[in-house]
Image: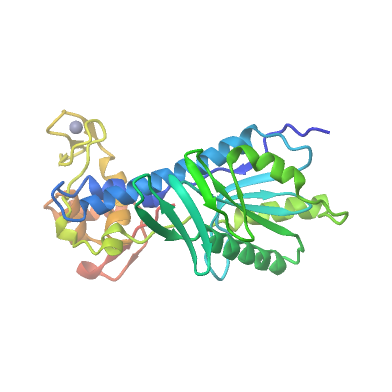
Amino acid sequence: MEVLAICTVKERDPSFKLQGLLAGQARLPASHPLFPVLAAKQSALEAGIGGEERVAEVLRKCSLPFEHQIFHDLSPASDECFQMDTYVFTPWFGLVLEAKNIAGILEFHDNPPQLIRIREDGHQDGFESPVAQLERNCELLRDWNVRHNVKLPIYGAVVVAYPRQIVAVAPAKTKVLFPSSITSYIKKIPQQSSKLEPETFNWLSHELLTSHRPFIPKPLSESYGIPFSDFIPGVRCFVCGRIGMVKLPRTWHCPFCGANDHLAHVAMFREWFLIFKRSITNQECRWFLGIEDIHTASRILQSMGFPSVGAFRYREYMIELF
Ligand SMILES: [Zn+2]
């Protein structure tokens, strides 16, 4: 029987890391010494996301002749943090896919675990081994299953997401797949007679989903050691994208394009969280939003409903993204 139902249970989360990099770069002068580093990191992240999306696209189109569920970008709560690019869950087995999207000729070395990329000009770059990452993820998922009293064989494979990736040296024990071979690989995984009962399968799927914790990266300034004062403060206009909206009694006004937006500050707390830190004081709020009046800043902070600690001038508001 061909099961054609859409089986994607969870899509990718938005990448806070990418959002932080974009927001941070938009607030740094182009001459800042770390600008090229951030831009390179952004490209690598975008390529990675592109690879994961390529895998998701293949899985959306594939039809497997047995029950299965697909989770993208899943981080089940556990003692140790782990994040799976893609998890194919069936009553017979689980399959963890780790997508890699690095152009060039690839050599997977096992000892020590490393991925070497050889560019067209012969230049070599070393990357963290996706094999080591995959093995760790499989191990942590097995532990997670054990803690839920479930025995399920767990398989893993690395997916090189684009054809311009050439695998010159494959890892000794780990399967490397191209997107086009994912479906046939899944169909060949043995299905033993023992399988999860439908109630257990559905319960475990629900547990995976509810235990998922989105990945919250460290603030950009902390990750890259950039002082707060290097960033340009101000409220961004969402019509023209420029920074410097002015606070009027009931709204924010953009002096560049004339747009008004009474909620323009809301998205700025998200930028603060991603660039600077998880909490904000009245003084920091005034600096970042470009307002002088302490009471206006208080009103804005209180309107956000953030929990606060401390009193008066020592009060800090804890920003919650969710
Ligand atoms: Zn504007």
Query: Where's residue 122, x and y in %?
Result: 36, 50
Frontmost residue, 198 versus 135: 135
Query: Where's residue 307, x and y in %?
Result: 37, 61
Query: Where's residue 221, x and y in %?
Result: 26, 60
Colour scheme shown:
rainbow
Image quadrant in which you'd find residue 147: bottom right
- Seen at 52% across and 42% down, the residue is 161
Find the residue positioned furthest to the top: 258
Image quadrant in which you'd find residue 282: bottom left
Frontmost residue, 52 versus 190: 190
Frontmost residue, 269 versus 157: 157
Q: Quadrant of the N terminus?
A: top right
Q: Above or below — where is 150 with respect to 95?
A: below
Find the residue positioned furthest to the right: 193
The number of numbered discs placed on residues in the rendered structure image is 0
Query: Where's residue 311, x and y in %?
Result: 26, 70
Image quadrant in which you'd find residue 224: bottom left
- Seen at 28% across and 55% down, the residue is 275
- Seen at 28% across and 64% down, the residue is 222
- Would residue 169 be found to the left or right of residue 314 on screen? right
Say whether residue 14 is visible.
no
Say whether residue 225 is visible.
yes
Find the residue positioned furthest to the front: 122
Frontmost residue, 199 versus 37: 37
Tell which quarter ligand 1 is in: top left
- Would residue 205 be found to the left or right of residue 151 on screen? left
- Seen at 69% across and 52% down, the residue is 205
- Would residue 183 be found to the left or right of residue 291 on screen? right
